[in-house]
Amino acid sequence: MNALNGPPLSRSRAALAGAVALAALALPVLGTPYLVDVGTQVLVYVMLGLGLNVVVGYAGLLDLGYAAFFAIGAYTTALLMVQYHVAFWATLPVAALFTAISGVVIGAPTLRMRSDYLAIVTLGFGEIVRIAATNFTFTGGPEGIYGIPHPTIGEFVLRSPRAMYFLAMAFALLVLAGSYNLARSRLGRAWLAIREDETAAQAVGIYPVYFKLMAYILGAVFAGAAGSFFAVKLTAINPSSFTFIQSVTILMVIILGGMGSLPGVILGAAVIVILPEALRGFDRYRMLAFGIGLIILMLLRPQGLWPSRIGQIERRAVALSEASAAAGRAVDTASTPE
Amino acid sequence: MQVALQQLVNGLTVGAFYALIALGYTMVYGIIRLINFAHGDIYAVGAFVGLSLYGLLAALRIQNPILTTLLALVVSMGFTGLLGVLLYRVAYRPLLHARLSILISAIGGSLTLEYGLFLIYSPSFLVYPHLFGRAGPSFGSVDVSWLQVVIFVSGLVLMAALYLLVHRTKIGMAMRALAINQDAARLMGVDVDRVIALTFFLGSVLAAFAGVLTGLYYSQISFLMGFLIGLKAFTAAVLGGIGNIPGAVLGGFLLGILEGLAAGYFSSRWKDVVAFAILIIILVVRPRGLLGERVVERM
């Protein structure tokens, strides 16, 4: 996992990353089934966080309905496996295709909007998908779909918590490798350019709508993969897993961890899953403590637990951009209360 | 036609709630560019504090429904307004320059309020006093209750008062100046922190008003009641053009009416889909909302 943050990695961070990798490998061997299951949940959020990170962290587009793509992936796999007896592996490309299409459907008409409006449109899209899943009969209504078969490799059925953990790990590593390479590809550099200064990016020949759409599609496909895994892991899915709160939770993963930073996403996923689990002893006070904990975390570390290095360089440049932003705000009079 | 009129009346009532809550979203957004996720829960707090007041007054044997309602409204609005200011001071002020962190802090605030209510009051629905019956002025075959009339009229009065405050007073001028350029406003001697705190206070006061009246209207409340209505009210604010006060009012009523019609003619199960679909269509056709002005997003 050393390669996550590029070569010049500080020693303490390298040690931490090594410890995390060791823990991740030791968990299925030494952990109880409960702990392994918690680990699998962390990995699901790692996948989702990495996918949303492409949209929010790389391309700088706020998405508040990301759970919709997660839902589309999960329902595609579940329906194909239950209704048409398709093998799990064969459902993956279909899920990818469907989520990619839905990424285009929601992205194409909306990407020219102001970012805050984009946020609310994605929120609306997320709600529409969830309500549609609740109301249609072919999605099983509020009960959802159950009896989803376990995936198989040859004769071997992936059923035990440990097997699911390794499957999740494989998915997460694939998504991780994909994100890592994306950030360093032509696409990744174009996203960075758009995020930092769209006008300048356009001036050097980057067509923002195309690249934003690519971010949407790739982010959607990652969420779809996570959804496919989620369906076979739980063997039953229903709309309550794909609420607005789910979208917000995934967003919290990447903001907690530090925007655009891959180790940050992993750390954020761990905190989001483990913190409420660890607070189970407090039972009634659990969610209250979680809410207060979020505020305190943000007050203490507004840049996230493990900010990306690009983010740190940005902050040094903030002092410079502050002046131009002030000039910009003078022109931006649209939000005056009338 | 009768269905349409009936749904119009219901839509105007619900729309008044949306509009009152949307004003809080739009003012805060206009000034510090924050989607205040906790605002829906502020509204819920308003409803619960109102319920406590009704309980207290009943224990004191004050029975007059109008007097108790006025007292419940005033105390709830005052308390909730101060809570809004507290939320701003604790959770938002230190993060004013970290756009996404402040959003997470707002979500944390939302959870804190929700589960604070959960612990203090009850995990299940609570019943509001049933003070006003279904009677009302007669409009042929359309049912209108006096409560609906009161909600609609008092809502409009408050909205008009807010408009006058923002446009006709010195403090309102400071708010508008702040929305345009915070640094320039500070240089002109505006106490930026106080004006932002006042904005939170006003938004929370309006939300609390809506909270108590929804309690009376639906006669039950729960600790999660602010979530969906908060989402819808924010939708309404965006629909009208966020940052714009008449826009929030227009968006709120429009959303209420469209939802009412969708529930009447289509199916109430799909009414939220209709609301969000209309929002998406309007934003695609007119990306700055109905009353929003043209904006250059980035310079």
Image: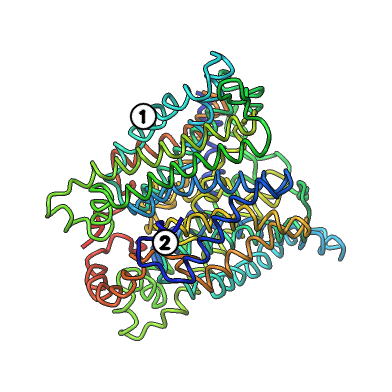
Residue at position x 35%, y 68% in the image: B179
Residue B150 place in picture, x, y as percent: 60, 50
Looking at the rendered structure, the kind of residue marked 2 is: Tyr
Looking at the rendered structure, the kind of residue marked 1 is: Ile
Specify the farthest residue to the top: A84
Q: Is residue B48 above or below residue A231?
A: below
How many neighbours does mark 1 have within 10 angstroms: few (below 14), some (14-19), or many (20 or more)?
A: some
Q: If the image is split into quadrants, where does the C terminus of chain B sit?
A: bottom left
Helix or strand or loop: what does disc 2 sit on?
A: helix
Image mark count:
2
Residue A249 place in picture, x, y as percent: 55, 50
Position of A196 with respect to B210 (left or right) is left
Helix or strand or loop: what does disc 1 sit on?
A: helix
Q: Which residue is mark 1?
A: A101
Color scheme of the displayed model = rainbow
Q: Is residue A283 above or below residue A41?
A: below
Q: Quadrant of residue A241?
A: top right
Residue A124 place in picture, x, y as percent: 45, 40
Q: Is residue A18 above or below residue A227?
A: below
Q: Which residue is mark 2?
A: B29
Q: Nearer the viewer, residue A109 or B210?
A: A109
Residue A115 visible in this rendered orientation of the protein: yes
Task: Name the chain letter of the residue that bears numbered label 1.
Answer: A
Residue at position x 58%, y 26% in the image: A151
Q: Nearer the viewer, residue A285 or B298?
A: A285
The disc label shown at residue B175, or none:
none
Residues at circles 1 and 2 in contact by the CB criterion of under 8 Å: no
Q: Is residue B110 above or below residue B152?
A: below
